[in-house]
Image (cartoon, helix red, strand yellow):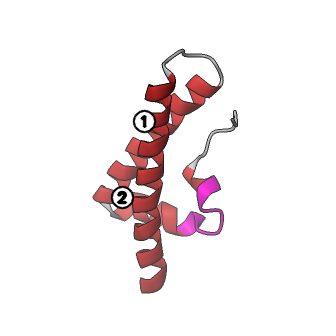
């Protein structure tokens, strides 16, 4: 278990400029990024033992984070191909 937050910039270290551009120009991407940030922060608080929850709920959040990162990754990949 890691106590380091998984920020989008860390997940896509070579794509900072694309992430920024998408956040500025793509409302759907911005919505996904906001959801990812919220879920990620909640996971970080749980892993840091700031908040307590059930293991099942923590696993559900991690699965949600993975699904969001997959969807975000597809958008980043398409944006890179179009650039």
Tag of residue 43: none
Q: Residue at x 45, y 60 (%)?
A: 70
Say which residue label 1 marks. Answer: 60
Where does residue 40 sit, x and y in percent of width and height?
Answer: 51, 38
Q: Earlier in the sequence, mark 2 or mark 1?
A: 2
Quadrant assignment, res 50: top right
Please tell me whether residue 51 is drawn above or below residue 28 in the rendered image: above
Say which residue label 2 marks. Answer: 29
Q: Secondary structure at mark 2?
A: helix
Does the rendering let one see residue 75? yes
Q: Residue at x 41, y 44 (%)?
A: 64
Please tell me whether residue 60 is drawn above or below residue 8 in the rendered image: above
Q: Residues within 10 Å of mark 1 (few under 14, many from 20)?
A: few
Please tell me whether residue 65 is drawn above or below residue 2 in the rendered image: below
User: Within the magenta stretch, is there residue 15?
Assistant: yes
Q: Is the Cβ of the residue at disc 2 closer than 8 Å to that at disc 1?
A: no
Q: Which residues are magenta?
A: 10-17
Extreme residue in the bottom direction: 82
Is residue 66 shown left or right of residue 1? left
Quadrant, the N terminus: top right
Is residue 50 shown left or right of residue 28? right
């Amino acid at each position: 278990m890691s106590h380091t937050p998984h920020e989008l910039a860390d997940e896509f270290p070579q794509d900072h400029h694309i992430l920024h551009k998408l956040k500025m120009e793509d409302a759907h991407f911005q919505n996904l990024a906001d959801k990812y940030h919220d879920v990620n922060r909640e996971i970080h608080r749980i892993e840091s033992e700031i908040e307590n929850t059930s293991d099942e709920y923590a696993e559900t959040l991690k699965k949600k984070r993975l699904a969001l990162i997959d969807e975000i990754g597809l958008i980043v990949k398409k944006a890179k191909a179009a650039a």
